Amino acid sequence: MLFNSLDFLCLLVPAFVLYYLPFLHRFQLHLIVVASFIFYAYSEPWLLSLLVISIGINIVASYGAVHGEAGYRKLYATLGVVVNLSILLFFKYSPLFGRSFFSGTGLGEFLVAIPLPIGISFFTFQGISLAVDAYRGRDLPEYKSIIVKNIWQHSLSSAAFKSFFPQLVAGPVVKAKDFLPQITTKYFSGIDWEKAVGALVVGYFLKMVIADNMSEQTFWLTYPYFKGLSSITLIALLFGYSMQIFADFAGYSLIAIGLGHLFGYTLMTNFNFPYLSRSFSEFWKRWHISLSSFLREYLYIPLGGNRKGPVRTYINLMLTMVLGGLWHVAAWSYAVWGAFHGGVLAVERLLQDKFGGPFKVPKLLSTLFVFMCVTLAWLLFKLPDFNHVIAYVEALAGNWTSGEMQPLILYFIALLSIPIVAYHIFHYGNEDKARAWRAKWRPYAYGIMLFLLLTNSGSGGAFIYFQF
């Protein structure tokens, strides 16, 4: 079910009204779970069984990690992590293994035919968080009050956490230690309308006006259509896709955050104007923050982080980013994308270790350099077949004096990119004067976005992150 559909509105409105009826307050978690199950099962009802099984596994693992016998608590948490990863490996990576190692065999055909359940990357990661956070906090009083002794209440809270529909299928990735403490009775008077409406307006604008319209232009990035285009047009298409992927990803996250506020829950900021980044490490502090912080806390640090010497640090960075790339899609091109980001992060760390800090480069130049490198790497998202990526780079390098110029593509990409550039500039600077300026002009910006939503929305398409 798409956020930008009438079907979703028909689910959201009744759920919202029932949620805040005073005589139903004690059933708020029940309503969240039911609404989330309807949301997830709407297109493919059979997938609900997998979500329910995953929820059940993580209820047992997290409860046992806190309230189990002392000698078995770590075992509960470990089994929870292993089973979550096993589910993810089976459904997401079996086709990759089938194509890569068992092509042409009966086993290969079976593995390739395994379907990819929508949102599995997100709800399995949250299951890992539930098991690990419960074990890590097993001796802390606040965790024993979160993973409560009452198994039914714990089951209900865990089900609501794992299935919370605003972020169920495409994030942000929510950690148990951040969500579970927020489970209290919610009141209509407690809704932060400014944050909720602001996030929803900007999110829907980014998705429906920018990303959906830009997708009609970046279609030409598809193989083999780009082969006959001029290098200038190919550069513009790359720039446009960089704008589109930000608008699509950040748009979904903002919609999820706004919906979370409507139901009384605060979800973490997921995109913090990443194209203002002056370094690759800063980019990953601004881009898909919930995923990068999850990988750091549950993978990079357990691998040793930067505590075991510089060489091990570089290896850990590379490994974390390669696995992060494969987390997105089970394709080797995504591993290459992750290796690229791991490599540039390792080089940055090496330069810092060797020279005692980052080079003094003009801010504009460093920002442009990071943006250009990140944008070039987005090719691996748009063209998962690595041969198509190579063909695009060859066309980009060889079509300067040949190829067809597409003025309309250039015009629409430039026009649709202006709001993204303005969006970043509008939020540039944290000094009091800049904050006051933003507060003054924000209502006018919302008005313009609402007008464009009503008059210039593109053809409603699925969010890019639904494939992950």
Image (cartoon, rainbow, N blue to C red):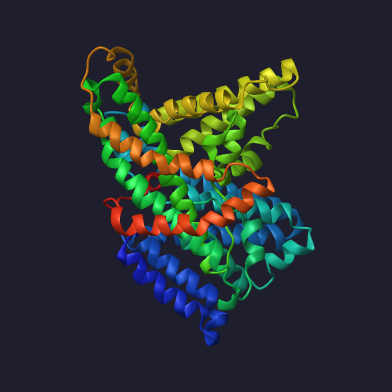
Whether 355 is drawn above or below 123: the answer is above
Q: Nearer the viewer, residue 175 or 414?
A: 414
Tell how many labels: 0
Residue 348 is left or right of residue 385, and the answer is right
Q: In this view of the protein, can residue 343 be seen by the observer? A: yes
Relative depth, front residue between 344 and 121: 344
Residue depicted at 76% across the width and 57% down the height: 70
Q: Residue furthest bottom?
A: 23
Location of residue 134 by image quarter: bottom right
Image x and y of residue 242, in percent? 41, 35
- Left or right, 83 with reference to 40: right
In the image, residue 330 sits, relative to residue 73, either above or below, namely: above
Residue 53 visible somewhere in the drawing: no
- The residue positioned 45% from the left and 78% from the top of the image is 17
Residue at horizontal 68 percent and vertical 37 percent from the top: 302
> Could you tell me which quadrant the N terminus lies in?
bottom left
Q: Position of residue 204 (x, y in %)?
A: 40, 55
| Image spot of residue 18 (x, y percent) | 46, 80
Tell which of 341 and 242 is nearer to you.
242
Of residues 183 and 192, the one drawn nearer to the viewer in this rendering: 192
Which residue lies at the image location 47% right of the left edge and 35% below the top edge?
Answer: 326
Left-right relation of 73 to 462: right
In the image, taking residue 204 as reference, residue 259 lies left or right, namely: right
Looking at the picture, does residue 424 appear above or below residue 52?
Answer: above
Q: Position of residue 4 (x, y in %)?
A: 35, 58
Which quadrant does the C terminus fall into? top left
Place residue 76 in its image quadrant: bottom right
